[in-house]
Image (spheres, rainbow, N blue to C red):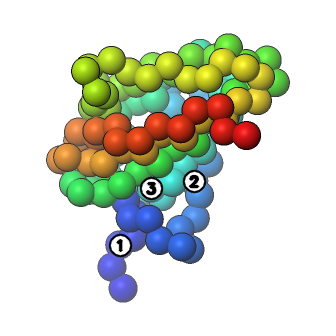
């Protein structure tokens, strides 16, 4: 059996990221991550990215809402403009990235305020 991180498979385990000022994401621990923001945060450049891998992060606002998420320079967005998360309390957004290289991740899909 090979490595499965960076691929979407039915049994893939979700990785809970630690909510802190700078959020770390080790892709070797799972290509599907989630976090609840309790303050304005930065999603640091991830490690162990596989070129061609697909990575998803579910971002949830806490009960207060209005939290922002900045992104490391390796996250690339259409037009060079990062996405703005939904701001209402308990809002759920999902961002999907495809790794162009072992460092650059392109946003390919974003779903906002999922209910």
* Mark toward the start of the polypeptide (3 vs 2): 2
For the question of whether residue 52 can be seen, the reply is: yes
First in sequence: mark 1 or mark 2? 1
Mark drawn on residue 31: 3
Separation of marks 1 and 2 at Cα, in angstroms: 16 Å
Q: How far apart are the alpha carbons under marks 3 and 1?
A: 11 Å
Q: Quadrant of the N terminus?
A: bottom left
**Percent x, y for residue 105?**
28, 40
**In the image, is 113 to the left or to the right of 5?**
right
Q: Considering depth in this image, is 24 or 31 the residue closer to the camera? A: 31
Q: Quadrant of residue 70?
A: top left
With respect to residue 37, does 49 lie above or below? below
Residue 51: x %, y % from top left: 21, 54
Instruction: From the top left corner, tell me how far across and down residue 76 is, in percent.
Output: 28, 30
Query: In this view, which residue lies farthest toward the left?
Result: 101
The local secondary structure at tag 2 comes to: strand
Q: Label 3 to label 2, Cα distance in Å?
A: 8 Å
For label 2, the residue is: 15
| Front of the two marks 3 and 1 | 3
Per the rendering, the mark at residue 3 is 1
**Left or right for 88, reference 51:** right
């Amino acid at each position: 059996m090979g490595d499965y991180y960076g691929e979407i498979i039915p049994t893939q385990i979700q990785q809970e990221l630690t909510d802190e000022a700078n959020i770390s994401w080790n892709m070797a621990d799972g290509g599907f991550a989630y976090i609840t923001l309790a303050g304005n945060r930065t999603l640091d450049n991830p490690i162990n990215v596989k070129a061609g891998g697909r990575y998803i992060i579910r971002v949830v606002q806490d009960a207060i809402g209005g939290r922002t998420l900045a992104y490391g320079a390796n996250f690339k967005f259409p037009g060079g403009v990062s996405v703005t998360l939904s701001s209402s309390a308990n809002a759920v957004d999902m961002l999907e990235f495809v790794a162009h290289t072992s460092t650059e991740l392109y946003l390919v899909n974003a779903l906002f305020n999922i209910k």
